Image: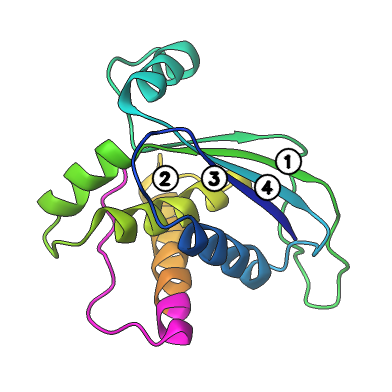
């Protein structure tokens, strides 16, 4: 899997953890190993501009996803996954830090960015959370992926609770 993490935010973030959890999520979702993903970390001003431009909403947000080839996980275990460009995930550490601090299970900015990276991957794969049943499916899958990755890494303590908007 080709995953590029580009930090343009001016904030120090754990880029390796973002890359690792994104790779874990894509592998778990059975996405073709030659698929490509780009993760960009930006400051609040850049995120606000994207949020206004693409969502017509004011203020910065935590994560935005821009799908390219609209890849989807294979529907059957023996089905060969398609290869292609997944797209871009844009993360904002300033919003992540605030959300992590305000979450019921307080956690670090980096833990929130890891959660948001998984959230962004799921959006690229066609998952959404507009309807209650979609939200339950997406957030359940998101929690399972984050918990699985944390367990594999030997990380202890509770996983971050979903705080994404």
User: Dividing the image into 4 quarters, which one contains the C terminus?
Assistant: top left
The span from disc 1 to disc 4 (Cα, nearest Å) is 12 Å
Q: Nearer the viewer, residue 2 or 87?
A: 2
Look at the image and give the residue range highlighted in magenta: 148-165
Q: Tell me whether circle 1 and circle 4 mark residues in contact (CB < 8 Å).
A: no
Determine which of the numbered discs, if any, sits on residue 129 in the image.
Answer: 2
Residue 115 lies, in percent from the top left, at 38, 58
Q: Is residue 23 left or right of residue 113?
A: right
Alpha carbon separation for disc pair 2 and 4: 22 Å
Secondary element under disc 3, as helix, strand or loop, is helix
Colour pattern of the rendering: rainbow
Q: CA distance from mark 3 to mark 4?
A: 13 Å
Q: Could you tell which of marks 1 and 3 lies nearer the N-terminus?
A: 1
Looking at the image, is 153 positioned above or below residue 65? below
* Sequence-wise first label, 1 or 2: 1
Viewer-proximal residue among 15 and 133: 15
50 to 21, vertically: above or below: above
The residue positioned 41% from the left and 54% from the top of the image is 133
> Percent x, y for residue 24?
58, 70
| SS at badge 2 | loop
Residue 80 percent across, percent down from the top left: 88, 67
Question: Where on the picture, by quarter, is residue 79?
Answer: bottom right
Q: Callout 4: helix, strand or loop?
A: strand
- Say which residue label 1 marks: 70
Circle 3 residue: 123
User: Mark 2 or mark 4: which is in front?
Assistant: 4
Left or right: residue 53 versus residue 62 is: right
- Is residue 110 covered in magenta? no
Quickly name the residue at label 4: 37
């Amino acid at each position: 899997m080709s995953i590029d993490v580009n930090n343009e935010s001016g904030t120090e973030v754990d880029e390796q953890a973002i890359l690792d959890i994104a790779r874990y999520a894509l592998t778990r979702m059975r996405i073709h190993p030659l698929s490509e993903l780009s993760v960009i970390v930006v400051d609040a001003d850049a995120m606000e501009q994207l949020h206004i431009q693409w969502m017509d909403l004011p203020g910065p947000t935590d994560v935005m996803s821009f799908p390219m080839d609209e890849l989807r996980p294979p529907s059957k275990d023996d089905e060969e996954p398609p290869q292609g460009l997944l797209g871009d995930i844009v993360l904002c550490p300033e919003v992540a830090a605030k959300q992590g601090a305000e979450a019921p299970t307080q956690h670090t900015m980096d833990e929130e960015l890891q959660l948001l990276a998984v959230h962004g991957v799921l959006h690229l794969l066609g998952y959404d959370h507009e309807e209650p049943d979609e939200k339950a499916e997406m957030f359940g899958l998101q929690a399972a992926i984050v918990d699985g990755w944390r367990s594999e890494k030997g990380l202890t303590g509770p996983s971050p609770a979903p705080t994404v908007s």
